[in-house]
Image (cartoon, helix red, strand yellow):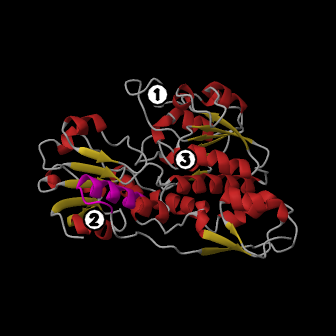
Amino acid sequence: MPSSGLRLLVDANIPDAETAFGPLGSVRTIPGHAITRDALAEVDALVVRSVTRVDAALVEGTPVRFVGTATAGVDHVDEDALAGLGIAFASAPGSNAASVVDYVLAALLAVAAHRGETLAGRTLGIVGLGEVGGRLARRAAALGLDVLACDPPRAAAGHADHDYHSLGDVLDQSDIVSLHTPLTTPAQSPWPTLGLIAEADRLRPHAWLVNAARGRVVTPEAAFALAASRPVVLDVWPNEPQPDPALVDAVALGTPHIAGYALDGKHRGTAMIAAALYAWAGLGRPAERLGDSAHLVAEVTDSSGGVPDPTAWLDALARQAADIRGDDARFRAALAGTTGDRRAAAFAALRKTYPVRREMDRYTVRGPIPEAVQTAVSEGLGMRLSLASGL
């Protein structure tokens, strides 16, 4: 495809940038935190991730005519400001949804296995039933969890895909609460999520909490109080990227905002922004396919022929694709003893150097899979069953 001569600036953490955007013109990559107004002096199109705040202060008066974020979330972008400046905008909704669901399920299995408890039969309250929450509901049900859904905007819009409950009812009835909302203020939404969980006693005593949405959906005070009395899993933090050391110490599992960082989701996000940019430039669709079609193998580690502990059995399989314990250990080690800017730099470095993780549906299970867990493996974890799976 002939070059259109566009000048593009792309976050260095976006994979395949040259392949995806190179046919459109010249591509320059820099770290997301280094994308400043001065860096945009000779840029027509800007492609970012969530670490870069895009607003009028950044782009007004620059040559930028297109902004894309290779992420599903858009709360780092002032869309109204871009529209007012006549700047086109595109995002990548759902691009990393499977990755986030993989993370949540792997984390729940890890916590349950560590505690010697069973995951199936518990009630999972999902707050936010968008791309991530909707997929989580389906896959969690296949793992034997009873799902309660809370999403006031979807309920008000008449969506009939779930029986929607109030936040109060979900918090009152759930053994586990998983948050998957955008971050909104009262000025932005009739259902603001800023500080949505502000009091620990809104949850049932000992109910687990998972936040893989936005850090400030939970207040620091509530996060501390909850972590002191039950398992809390945080991928996002109230004062990110400088999470409070005491809160890091208190949570059951902590990670540096990488739930959606599976390589497949990153490729998908790049491809979605490339398609939007090509369309905006009037050049049809990109010719290049991004990523690969690799099929990976997860090994059955218990070949005894029985399932004495389904939760531990599934955990051993899930961690081969999403090793949340390893992520947690690296996170704690990297942040230990750091403060201020050094802590923020360590947090950013963990994200930049995050080990390659593939989505669970890339895996085929090799080894005997007891019939009792085949649905959990194929529909819950999303892994393929080998031809010789049944027992």
Q: Is residue 280 magenta?
A: yes
Cβ–Cβ under 8 Å for marks 2 and 1: no
Q: Main secondary structure of the magenta part?
A: helix
Q: Tag 1 or tag 3, which sits nearer the N-term?
A: 3
325 up-or-down from 207: above or below: below
x then y, percent, for residue 143? 73, 52
Give left or right: position of 353 versus 255.
Answer: left
Q: How far apart in space, not on screen, are marks 3 and 1 (Cα)?
A: 19 Å
**Residue for badge 3:** 132
What's the residue type where badge 2 is placed?
Answer: Phe
Give the alpha-carbon distance from disc 2 to disc 1, as whole Å: 36 Å
Picture quadrant where residue 383 is located: bottom right
Which label was assigned to residue 192?
1
Q: Quadrant of the N terminus?
A: bottom left
Give the Cα distance between marks 3 and 2: 27 Å
Q: Earlier in the sequence, mark 3 or mark 2?
A: 2
Instruction: Identify the magenta region.
Output: 269-285
User: What mark, if any, has residue 23 been given in the picture?
Assistant: none
Check disc 1 and report its element: helix, strand or loop: loop
| Residue occupying image coordinates x 70% and y 31% | 204
Quadrant of the image containing the C terminus: bottom right
The label nearer to you, 2 versus 1, is 2
Relative horizontal placement of residue 282, taking residue 247 as reference (left or right): left
Circle 2 residue = 21
The disc labelled 3 sits on which kind of residue? Val
Name the residue located 74 percent from the left edge and 57 percent from the top edge. 113
